[in-house]
Image (cartoon, helix red, strand yellow):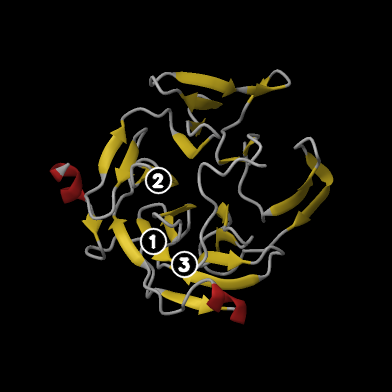
Amino acid sequence: MSAIAGAFAFGGGYRDTAAQGAKRIDRLDPALDQIIDTSEPIVDIATNLGGTANVEGPLWWKEGGYLLFRGTDQKRWKYSPGQPISVFKENTNWANGITRDMQGRLVACEALTRRITREEPDGSNTVLASSFKGQPFNRPNDIVVKSDGAIYFTDPWTAAEPPGAFKVAPNGTLLRQTDRVFADLSGAEPGGPDGMKVDTVGNVYCGGSGGLYIMDAKGKKLGRIVHGFANTANVAFGGDDWKTVYFCTRTSLGSFKIKVAGVPVPVAKKS
């Protein structure tokens, strides 16, 4: 662990070359004040984390009080507040997006094997899906489990597009004819849409041009967290009260506090 700690910088020490100027919180609408103070500090937990893979896929594990995220190569890393980052798992098959199902088991998008897997309590893996209509998946990326147990995941092949919003049918499938642009997060500054998460009152957090955006349930931009790095790779809520936002960039892990709790993982079962 000491070797790992020595390779990185923690708590705002060394800043790698991806850093892009001062941090700040842009207030785009007065409603932001109910979610976060513009004076709230944006914390660099660790920087200079870049390797042969982007830092991605954060997931807060409440029972253990730690955050899991994808590090370099095929490793999954662990961050416990106040402790150095350590390697949690050596070989994840390039697992990117990870979450937990209704039973608390970890489910993952494995980019290398092009499949969705579940980790069982005994450490074994169960393949949940690897193809559609006889064709293998492209490269599963992000994943979420709905309150009724349904698993949704993305399987991109080309560059990212603006976030779309679909209505959902009673059986859980997407009503494709309802596709619309939820929010345009493009701009002149680096960064594009990535890592959408929702808090308990319906606000949406998503990476975009120049930082991490906070939007209301209709896609209206309320604020932007300018964290100082070239992109936002993914986002997770955490902490004992789910009021800490952890975010990954391609080379760093950071956090900030909010006033509204995020949706817990695993999500509460739908009544």
Which kind of residue does numbered mark 1 sit on?
Answer: Ser
| Residue depicted at x 77% and y 37% | 173
Q: CA distance from mark 1 to mark 2?
A: 16 Å
- Dot 3 alpha-carbon crowd within 10 angstroms: few under 14, some 14 to 19, many 20 or more: some
Q: Nearer the viewer, residue 158 or 214?
A: 214
Instruction: Tell me the tag on residue 111.
Output: none
Above/below status of 252 relative to 257 = above
Q: Nearer the viewer, residue 108 or 122?
A: 122
Q: CA distance from mark 3 to mark 2?
A: 17 Å
Q: Nearer the viewer, residue 84 or 226?
A: 84
Q: Earlier in the sequence, mark 3 or mark 2?
A: 2
- The answer to the question of whether label 1 and label 3 lie on touching residues, with beta carbons closer than 8 A, is no
| Residue depicted at x 37% and y 32% | 74
Instruction: Tell me the tag on residue 255.
Output: 1
Q: Is residue 110 visible?
A: no
Q: Earlier in the sequence, mark 1 or mark 2?
A: 2
Which kind of residue does numbered mark 2 sit on?
Answer: Lys
Where is mark 3, residue-wise? 258
Q: Position of residue 256 (x, y in %)?
A: 40, 65
| SS of the residue under disc 2 | loop
Q: Position of residue 190 (x, y in %)?
A: 50, 63
Q: Nearer the viewer, mark 1 or mark 2?
A: 2
| Residue depicted at x 51% and y 77% | 26
- Dot 2 alpha-carbon crowd within 10 angstroms: few under 14, some 14 to 19, many 20 or more: some
Left or right: where does residue 99 sit relative to residue 70? right
Q: Position of residue 176 (x, y in %)?
A: 81, 43
Above/below status of 187 relative to 264 = below
Q: Residue furthest front?
A: 271
Where is mark 2, residue-wise? 62
Which kind of residue does numbered mark 3 sit on?
Answer: Ile
